[in-house]
């Protein structure tokens, strides 16, 4: 107990003597001096740019090249469900590919998800390899979903999802 009290008093007295350390060159906070405020000249802003979006640069690791989606239509569309949300709806689609191992499943719209004459049309696509076995139906089942805003749903009467051999249609 006496040793702890002695060490505490010694530590406190050493810390009290370090008041001059704040102004010394050994203190890393004093290495660069005090900061000062200066006026900056305004840089010219290019027109029609959003300052919140950074400009992409071509580097060795990141190049500006468009990636082409290599998906093909899924064999069958088995189910289309539209689930309501507070901001619109989620179109959830189940499909059955010809072979197992399909991946990168997407719902692709040729009209950029805009209804044409009240019809909102999607294609169920997936990247599918030819060298996979056929497998069971459960192994070949794929799922995809897309969000549609309430404004687009208000202009839509029919939602059509197209596969390679069939299509599923849901109406309001």
Image (cartoon, rainbow, N blue to C red):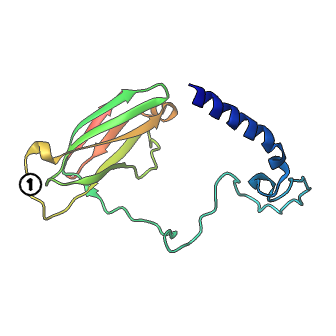
Farthest residue toward the right? 39
Q: Quadrant of the N terminus?
A: top right
Task: Identify which residue is drawn at 83% across, 54% down.
Answer: 24
Q: Nearer the viewer, residue 142 or 162?
A: 142
Above or below: residue 9 compared with residue 48: above
Q: Is residue 126 left or right of residue 109?
A: left
Task: Identify which residue is drawn at 36% across, 61% down.
Answer: 69
Above or below: residue 30 compared with residue 86: below
Return the x and y of residue 49 as percentages of the image width and height: 71, 57
Return the x and y of residue 104 as percentages of the image width and height: 30, 53
Can you identify the residue that label 1 sits on? 134
Can see residue 11? Answer: yes
Can see residue 118? Answer: no
Dot 1, how many residues are within 10 Å of its Cα: few (below 14), some (14-19), or many (20+)?
some
Q: Which quadrant would residue 116 be assigned to in this image?
A: top left
Per the image, label 1 sits on a secondary structure element best described as: loop
Q: Which quadrant would residue 10 be assigned to in this image?
A: top right
Above or below: residue 110 compared with residue 55: above
Q: Is residue 70 left or right of residue 63?
A: left
Task: Identify which residue is drawn at 28% across, 39% down.
Answer: 93
Farthest residue toward the front? 2
Q: Is residue 20 left or right of residue 28?
A: right
Farthest residue toward the bottom? 60
Q: Is residue 26 left or right of residue 36?
A: left
């Amino acid at each position: 107990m006496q040793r702890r009290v002695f060490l505490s008093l010694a530590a406190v007295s050493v810390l009290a003597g370090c008041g001059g350390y704040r102004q010394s060159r050994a203190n890393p906070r004093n290495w660069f001096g005090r900061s000062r405020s200066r006026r900056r000249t305004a840089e010219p802003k290019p027109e029609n740019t959003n300052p919140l979006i950074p400009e992409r640069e071509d580097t060795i690791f990141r190049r500006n090249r468009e990636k082409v989606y290599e998906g093909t239509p899924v064999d069958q569309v088995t189910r289309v469900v539209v689930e309501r949300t507070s901001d619109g709806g989620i179109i959830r689609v189940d499909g059955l590919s010809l072979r197992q191992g399909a991946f990168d499943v997407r719902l692709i719209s040729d009209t950029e998800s805009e209804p044409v004459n009240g019809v909102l049309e999607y294609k169920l696509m997936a990247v599918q390899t030819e060298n996979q076995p056929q497998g069971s139906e459960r192994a070949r089942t794929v799922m995809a979903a897309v969000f549609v805003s309430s404004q687009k749903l208000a202009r839509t009467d029919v939602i059509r999802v197209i596969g390679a051999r069939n299509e599923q249609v849901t109406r309001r």
